[in-house]
Amino acid sequence: METNGIEKEVLEEIIKRMVVKKEELVEFLENKVENPSVVVNSITKALFDRGLITYVSPLGQNCYAITQKGMREKYE
C-alpha cells in the first residue's frame, strides 16, 4: 500500500526526527487538519499496522520511531 497525502507528511516528519512524541506530531498537524490529535491517532495506527513505525518509551515517554521498513518506504 502506498503512503500519500497527510499520512506521507507525518511519515516524513517521523523519518526526519527518527523518534517523535505524539504531542510533537499533533503540533506539526495543528494548522493542517481539524482535530489533529484524532488524525495523529489514526495515522500512527495505520503506519504501525503496516510496520513503518514502532512504539518506544525512552525515559518513560511514549513515542513513535521509524522502522527500517519505514525508511525504505521513503526511498522507493
Image (cartoon, rainbow, N blue to C red):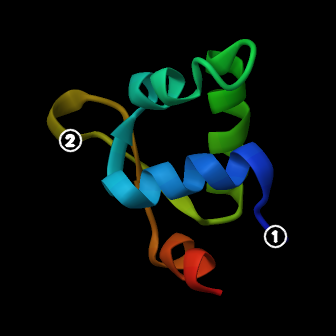
Residue displayed at 36% across by 41% down: 20
Q: For the view shown, which residue lies furthest in the right direction?
A: 1
| Mark closer to the chain start, 2 or 1 | 1
**Left or right position of 7 against 65:** right
Query: In the rendered image, which quarter contains the C terminus?
Result: bottom right
- Quote the CA–CA distance across marks 2 and 1: 30 Å
Q: Neighbour class for label 1 at 10 Å: few (<14), some, many (≥20)?
A: few
**Left or right position of 17 against 2:** left
Residue type (three-letter) at the residue carrying disc 1: Glu
Q: Position of residue 38 (x, y in %)?
A: 70, 19
**Left or right position of 54 against 29:** left
Is 16 placed above or below 40 here? below
Residue type (three-letter) at the residue carrying disc 2: Pro
Residue displayed at 62% across by 18% down: 37
Q: For the view shown, which residue lies furthest in the front direction?
A: 31
Instruction: Give the image quarter of residue 58.
Output: top left
User: Of the residues tagged 2 and 1, which is closer to the observer?
Assistant: 1
Is 46 placed above or below 3 here? above
Residue displayed at 65% across by 29% down: 41
| Label 2 sits on residue | 58
Q: For the view shown, which residue lies furthest in the top direction?
A: 35
Q: Position of residue 25 (x, y in %)?
A: 48, 31
Local SS, label 1: loop
| Label 1 sits on residue | 2
Local SS, label 2: helix
Residue displayed at 78% across by 50% down: 5
Q: Position of residue 12 (x, y in %)?
A: 53, 57
**Left or right position of 51 against 61:** right
